Amino acid sequence: MLITVIVGMIVFSELYSIIGHIYSINYKEELPEVDAFKMLLNSLVKLLKNLIKKQNEEIDPKEDLDSNENKDGAKDSSLS
C-alpha cells in the first residue's frame, strides 16, 4: 500500500508539472514553482502524526493505574 501511495504522489507531482508547463506555453505566463511532491509528502507526514497521536490517546495509561484499585477506591495491597 505504501508503494502505491508513493507512486501516486510522484504521478500527481509530474502531472501538476506538465499542466503547469502547458499553461505557461499557452498563456506566455510563468506559474509560480510549486513542489507538489514536497507538499504531498508534508501532508502525508501530518496525517501519520495525527494517526499516531490518536492511537496513543486511545491507549490511556491512567486506565491501567485505575485497574489496580478496588471498587471502593482502596489500593490493591498485593502491588505495594
Image: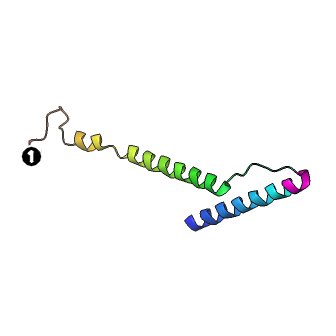
Q: Nearer the viewer, residue 29 or 70?
A: 29
Evaluate whether residue 1 shows in this view.
no
Measured along the vertical axis of the image, is residue 7 above or below residue 70?
below
Q: Nearer the viewer, residue 43 or 5?
A: 43
Side (left or right) of 14 relative to 46? right
Side (left or right) of 41 relative to 55? right
Q: Which of the image's four quarters has the C terminus?
A: top left
How far from the left and from the top, in percent, is residue 23? 85, 53
Dominant secondary structure, magenta: helix
Evaluate whether residue 68 shows in this view.
yes
Check disc 1 and give the amino acid type.
Answer: Ser
Picture quadrant of residue 70: top left
Picture quadrant of residue 72: top left
Residue at image point 23% right, 41% down = 65
Q: Residues within 10 Å of mark 1 (few under 14, many from 20)?
A: few
Residue at image point 58% right, 50% down = 43
Residue at image point 70% right, 64% down = 11
**Magenta segment:** 24-28
Q: Is residue 19 magenta?
A: no
